[in-house]
Amino acid sequence: MGRITRRGFVAGTAGALSGLITAGGALAADRDESLETAVRAVAEARGAAREFRGVWLATAANRDWPTRPGLGAAAQRAELLAHLDKAVERRLTAVVLQVRPTADAFWPSRYEPWSECLTGVQGEDPGWDPLGTAVAEAHRRGLELHAWFNPYRVAHHTDPARLAPTHPARVHPDWVVPYGGKLYYNPGLPEVRRFVQDAMLDAVRRYDIDGVHWDDYFYPYPVADQSFDDDEAYERYGSAFPDRDAWRRDNIDLLVRETAARIKKINGRVRFGISPFGVWRNAASDDRGSATRSGVATYDDLHADTRTWVREGLLDYICPQLYWNIGFEAADYAVLVPWWDAVARGTGVDLYIGEALYKAGDPAQPEAWQDPAELSRHLTLAQRYPAVRGHCFFAAQEVTQDRTGAMARVVADHYPARAR
């Protein structure tokens, strides 16, 4: 336990550079030359570790892939390989593939039915193994393949009869809570917590994946005038806690702790990472929080204590979704990057920044996103902070289409060569 790992050494060295950065997030040096010197020092402190350059490949509702349900196996495979090839072309290093979008699977799972995103019919065999193919083909191209799971979401509707007949949510209707027009597994039930771990870890045992990746869904995002009905579970299991919120946070903490331990027991090489909503708590609620005014906070609303998971080193990496532009008043990218840097520094947990490529050029977004250079400015700013070890872009469709050239600008400015 006392041995200093390479990652620990790099983290400690990077932390020693934190004096270069003021509490307000600006480098102490105010001249371009000093900035370049400081950034170079940070880069050297990071050592030879490979920079994480990721892209999310979303399958829920066929967002990125497959383009529609019911494509033949050959067409699905060709689309998948095209995404992997585009990642290589953009000089990325990792693909984060969504393989369990709604309590179903993109591999022949022992626990859950085939995903309806493949064939249009949940439980129908697509005639090939998408996850197995993705792992093999990603590795053949020098890419990491992180398997992206959603622990608790069951369906984008509230009708259990629409699920496959053998779906666990139909076999165990007492596990399920309808909320906000969707179905969720109840995180407050120990048998649910064990089951969702078993379902996800099936892929860890069977495939040479590089990472287990969760996104921002724990308890569901709040829906006005609706309550998540976990009264019975709270009455049964929550008596030791001061209130329901504390009990709910403990349920999610247990999921994280237990999953982390089980992954390492199965395969210590597989990394465990989480990509939460970017605001843990606002400073108005907690002086440890960020100088933001977000309407949602993971700690308070999703019952996910993301800061604690990092501070206690439960994860291998954290990838907060900082989907706001520099200067956005309620949640400024330039405020949140240094906040997360301070949280991660010295923990041994790598910090990757989730980037909203999908906003670039969208006329519904603020003016900053109409500038193709906005995203590149994000990476330039993040270079100042020692804990930041990479970025992940949402999502694959935009990496390919790149309607304003924002991704090409990132590649030209920051990825002049393939990461080694």
Image: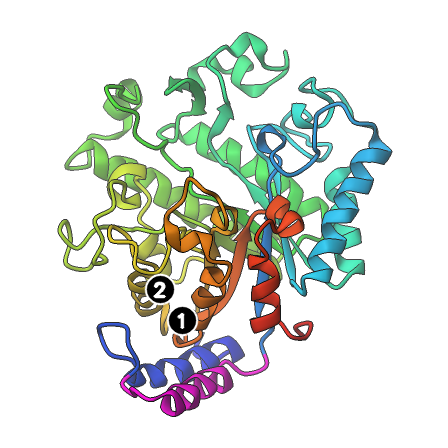
Residue extending farthest to the top is 161
**Residue 318 in view, yes or no:** no
Where residue 293 sits: x, y (%)? 21, 49
Distance from label 1 to label 2 (Cα)?
8 Å
Q: The C terminus is located in which quarter?
A: bottom right
Q: Residue at x 14, y 37 (%)?
A: 242
Mark 1 touches mark 2? (CB < 8 Å): yes
Q: Is residue 253 left or right of residue 316?
A: left
Among numbered discs 1 and 2, the one appearing first in the sequence: 2
Q: The N terminus is located in which quarter?
A: bottom left
> Which span is picked out in magenta?
28-48
Q: Label for residue 381?
A: 1
Which of the pair 201/158 is nearer the observer? 158
Q: Amino acid at mark 2?
A: Val
Magenta stretch: includes residue 16? no
Where residue 161 sits: x, y (%)? 55, 7
Q: Label for residue 199?
A: none
Q: Residues within 10 Å of mark 2 (few under 14, many from 20)?
A: many
Q: Residue at x 19, y 37 (%)?
A: 241
Place residue 183 in its image quadrant.
top left
Is residue 275 placed above or below 117 in the rendered structure?
below
Where residue 346 sits: x, y (%)? 36, 74
Is residue 371 placed above or below 195 in the rendered structure?
below
Which of the pair 373/347 is nearer the observer? 373
Q: Label for residue 337?
A: 2
Which of the pair 339/176 is nearer the observer? 339
- In this picture the colour scheme is rainbow
Is residue 415 placed above or below 408 in the rendered structure?
below
Badge 1 marks a residue whose secondary structure is helix
